[in-house]
Image (cartoon, helix red, strand yellow):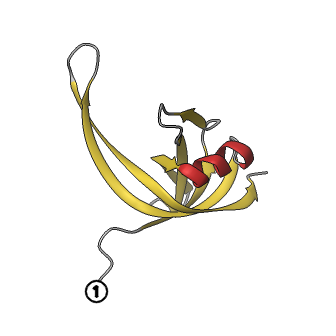
Amino acid sequence: MGIKNKVQLIGNIGKQPKVTTLENGKKLARVPLATNAHYTNSKGERQTNTNWHNLVAWGKIADFIENHVNKGEEIALEGKLTSRSYRNKRGNKHHITEVVVSEILLLGNKD
């Protein structure tokens, strides 16, 4: 048995989480996460490359995010990648990749 779809990230929350309660009573949290990679360029200058990840969480994890996770905080998470497509109001097709969170850990504030 191999690992087929597993993501582990450590990063900082980019915006206050958006949590909604669906008609069936289930909670859904959507959160942007920034991860940084640091490197030195050819001139010897330290550079940072930031990547943004769309996090999605359901149920108890969404409850935890709603009550304990705030913009700027550093978290560690485990989850899986999912991709989906949708059409906006103008009919344009968009593709989005999200990380469905299965575990989350607060690491502390950025500052």
The spot of residue 92 in percent (x, y) is 21, 21
Q: Is residue 52 visible?
A: no
97 to 75, vertically: above or below: above
Q: Quadrant of residue 42?
A: bottom left
- Of residues 52 and 80, which is closer to you in this image? 80
The spot of residue 39 in percent (x, y) is 51, 62
Measuring 20% from the left and 17% from the top, which residue is drawn there? 91
Lateral position of residue 9 relative to residue 17, left or right = left
Label 1 residue SS: loop
Q: Can residue 35 be seen in this view?
A: yes
- Of residues 69 and 53, which is closer to you in this image? 69
Residue at the disc numbered 1: 1
Measuring 48% from the left and 48% from the top, which residue is drawn there? 55
102 to 50, vertically: above or below: below
Measuring 42% from the left and 53% from the top, which residue is drawn there? 99
- Of residues 16 and 11, which is closer to you in this image? 16
Measuring 73% from the left and 49% from the top, which residue is drawn there? 68
